[in-house]
C-alpha cells in the first residue's frame, strides 16, 4: 500500500469520525464549546473571545476591548476600552447610561414622578445639556462662553457668561451672583451677604448664623446655631489661634491644623489632637464616639454603628459594622489580604476572601459562589468583576464559580488557565474534559460517557453500554443546552 493511499485512508477515517457541527468540542486554547441544560459556553484564542449563557442571562466578550451582559429581565451592562467606556440599561425605569471617558456622557431615565429626565456632556463637561419632558429642567452650556445648568455639583441651577466675567448660582432659596469670580459677589434670598475677595466678606441667615472675614483667610468670625438656646461663637486668627464656645463646650486650635483640644463637661466629652498623628476623643451625648489614634502605630474608632482598628496604619485593619439588620466583620492587610463576613437578620450570609493577586473567593448564600486564582482587581480601585472580564483570560490560573438562580438551574463551573481544563455541573449532569486527552460526561441516571484521544475512543457505561462512534476532535457529546425543563439534582 502506497504512502498516499495510507494517508487517504487515515484522512477518510478522521473525516468520517468528525463530531457533529453542534457537538461539544474542546481544543483549547484555540476553540472550545461546552453545554448543559440551559447552559452553554464558547471561547476561542485562550478566552479572548467568549460567549456564555445560563438560562436567559448571557455574556459575550472580546477581551480586552469589550464585554456585554444581557439579563433575563432585559437589563444590559457593557464595558469597552478597558473600562473607559460603559453602557447600562435598566428596563424597570427605562434608565440608559453611557460614557466614553473623557469624551462623552449620557443618561436618561423615567423619574419616580413619571418625568423623563435626560442629561449629556462632551469633552470634560465643557459642553453639556439636558432636558425633561415637562420642560422644567432644560439647559445647555458651552464653557467658558455661556449657558445654564441644573443639578450640577452642589447647585440646583446656575448660569454664566464669559466665565469668570459673570456667574450666578442657586441652591434652594439662596441666590449668589459673581462678577470677575471670585472677586466680587452678592448673596440674596434665604441667605444674604456680599464680598470683595479677599479683603472683606459677610453672610447672614436671619435667626440662624452670621459670619464675616477680613483679609481671608487670616481673620474669620461667626455666630452659628442662633436658633438654639446657646448659639456657638467662633473666631480664628489664621493660622495662629482659634476658639469655639457654645454653652459649656469649649474648643481651641493652635497653629492650625496641628494642635487642638476641646471639652464639654455636661456630656463627659473631651478631645485633644496633634493632627494628623495623634488624636484622643471620647464621650458625647447625641453622638457618642471614641477615637484613639497614634499614627502610624495604632488607630481605633468606635460609635453606635461601626468600630474599626488599624495597626501600623494603613496596612492592618479590623472592622465591625452593625446597622439595618446587618452584621459585617472584616480583616484586611492592605493591599494583599481581605476577608469579610456579612450576616443579615433574614439568615443570609456573604463571604469575600482575597489574597491579592493570587486568588479571590466570593460566596452569597443561595445566589452565587466564585473562586478565582490570580485576580488583579483591587477593592476600592478597580472593579474586580469588570477587570476579570477584560483581562482575566491572561492571569486567571483557576476559576471555581457557582451561580445559583431561583429558577430553574444551579450551575457549578471550574476552569483552568486558557480553558485547558473545563468542568461544569447543572441539572444532574456533569461534564469535564482536557483538550486532546479526554473527559467524562455523567448523566442524572448515572450513565457515564467517556471520550479519549481527541474523541477517537469513546464508550458509555450501563446496561446498553459499549463503544460509541468516534467524534474527532472530541469530546463530541451532544448539545443539551436547549433542555427546557432542568432535571432535579439528585
Image (cartoon, grey):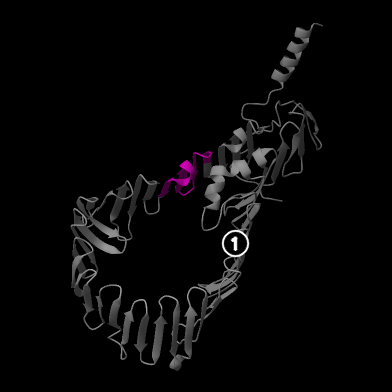
Out of 191 and 99, give the one closest to the viewer: 191
Read off the residue under disc 1.
334
- Find out whether residue 202 is within the magenta segment: no
**Could you say which quadrant of the image residue 249 lies in?**
bottom left
Quarter occupied by the N terminus: top right
The percent coordinates of residue 22 (x first, y second) are 61, 30
Q: Which residues are magenta?
A: 60-89
Instruction: Provide the major secondary structure of the magenta segment.
Output: strand
Q: Residue at x 19, y 52 (%)?
A: 146
The percent coordinates of residue 162 (x first, y second) are 19, 53
**Could you say which quadrant of the image residue 449 lies in?**
top right
For residue 401, side relative to residue 62 (left or right): right
The percent coordinates of residue 26 (x first, y second) are 67, 33
- Residue 190 showing in the rendered view: no
Give SS at disc 1: loop
Q: Residue at x 30, y 59 (%)?
A: 152
Q: Residue at x 25, y 76 (%)?
A: 213
Amino acid at each position: 500500500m502506497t504512502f498516499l493511499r495510507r494517508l487517504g485512508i487515515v484522512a477518510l477515517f478522521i473525516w468520517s469520525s468528525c463530531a457533529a457541527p453542534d457537538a461539544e468540542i474542546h481544543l483549547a486554547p484555540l476553540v472550545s464549546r461546552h453545554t448543559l441544560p440551559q447552559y452553554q459556553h464558547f471561547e476561542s484564542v485562550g478566552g479572548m473571545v467568549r460567549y456564555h449563557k445560563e438560562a436567559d442571562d448571557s455574556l459575550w466578550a472580546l477581551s480586552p476591548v469589550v464585554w456585554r451582559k444581557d439579563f433575563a429581565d432585559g437589563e444590559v451592562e457593557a464595558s469597552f476600552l478597558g473600562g473607559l467606556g460603559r453602557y447600562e440599561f435598566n428596563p424597570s425605569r427605562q434608565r440608559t447610561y453611557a460614557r466614553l471617558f473623557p469624551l462623552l456622557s449620557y443618561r436618561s431615565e423615567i423619574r419616580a414622578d413619571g418625568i423623563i429626565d435626560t442629561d449629556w456632556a462632551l469633552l470634560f463637561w465643557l459642553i453639556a445639556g439636558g432636558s425633561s419632558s415637562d420642560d422644567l429642567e432644560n439647559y445647555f452650556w458651552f464653557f467658558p462662553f455661556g449657558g445654564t445648568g441644573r443639578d450640577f455639583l452642589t447647585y440646583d441651577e446656575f448660569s454664566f457668561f464669559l466665565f469668570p466675567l459673570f456667574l450666578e448660582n442657586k441652591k434652594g432659596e439662596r441666590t449668589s451672583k459673581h462678577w470677575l469670580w471670585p472677586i466680587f459677589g452678592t448673596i440674596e434670598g434665604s441667605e444674604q451677604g456680599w464680598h470683595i475677595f479677599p479683603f472683606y466678606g459677610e453672610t447672614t441667615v436671619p435667626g440662624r448664623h452670621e459670619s464675616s472675614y477680613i483679609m481671608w483667610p487670616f481673620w474669620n468670625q461667626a455666630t452659628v446655631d442662633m436658633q438654639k438656646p446657646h448659639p456657638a461663637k467662633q473666631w480664628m486668627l489664621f493660622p495662629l489661634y482659634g476658639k469655639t464656645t457654645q454653652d459649656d463646650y469649649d474648643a481651641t486650635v493652635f497653629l492650625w491644623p496641628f494642635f487642638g483640644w476641646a471639652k464639654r463637661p455636661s456630656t463627659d466629652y473631651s478631645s485633644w489632637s496633634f493632627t494628623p498623628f495623634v488624636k484622643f476623643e471620647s464621650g458625647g451625648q447625641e453622638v457618642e464616639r471614641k477615637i484613639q489614634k497614634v499614627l502610624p502605630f495604632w488607630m481605633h474608632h468606635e460609635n453606635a454603628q461601626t468600630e474599626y482598628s488599624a495597626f501600623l496604619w494603613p496596612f492592618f485593619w479590623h472592622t465591625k459594622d452593625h446597622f439595618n439588620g446587618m452584621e459585617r466583620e472584616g480583616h484586611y492587610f492592605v493591599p494583599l489580604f481581605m476577608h469579610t463576613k456579612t450576616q443579615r437578620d433574614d439568615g443570609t450570609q456573604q463571604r469575600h476572601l482575597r489574597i491579592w493577586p493570587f486568588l479571590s473567593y466570593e460566596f452569597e448564600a443561595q445566589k452565587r459562589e466564585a473562586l478565582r486564582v490570580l485576580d488583579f482587581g483591587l477593592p476600592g480601585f478597580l472593579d474586580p468583576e469588570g477587570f476579570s472580564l477584560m483581562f482575566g483570560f491572561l492571569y486567571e490560573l483557576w476559576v471555581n464559580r457557582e451561580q445559583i438562580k431561583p429558577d430553574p438551574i444551579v450551575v457549578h463551573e471550574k476552569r483552568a488557565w486558557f480553558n485547558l481544563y473545563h468542568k461544569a455541573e447543572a441539572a444532574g449532569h456533569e461534564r469535564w474534559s482536557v483538550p486532546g486527552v479526554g473527559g467524562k460526561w455523567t448523566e442524572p441516571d448515572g450513565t457515564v460517557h467517556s471520550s479519549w484521544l481527541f474523541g477517537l475512543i469513546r464508550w458509555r457505561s450501563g446496561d446498553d453500554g459499549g463503544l460509541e462512534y468516534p467524534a474527532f476532535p472530541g469530546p463530541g457529546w451532544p448539545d443539551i443546552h436547549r433542555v427546557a425543563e432542568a432535571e432535579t439534582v439528585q
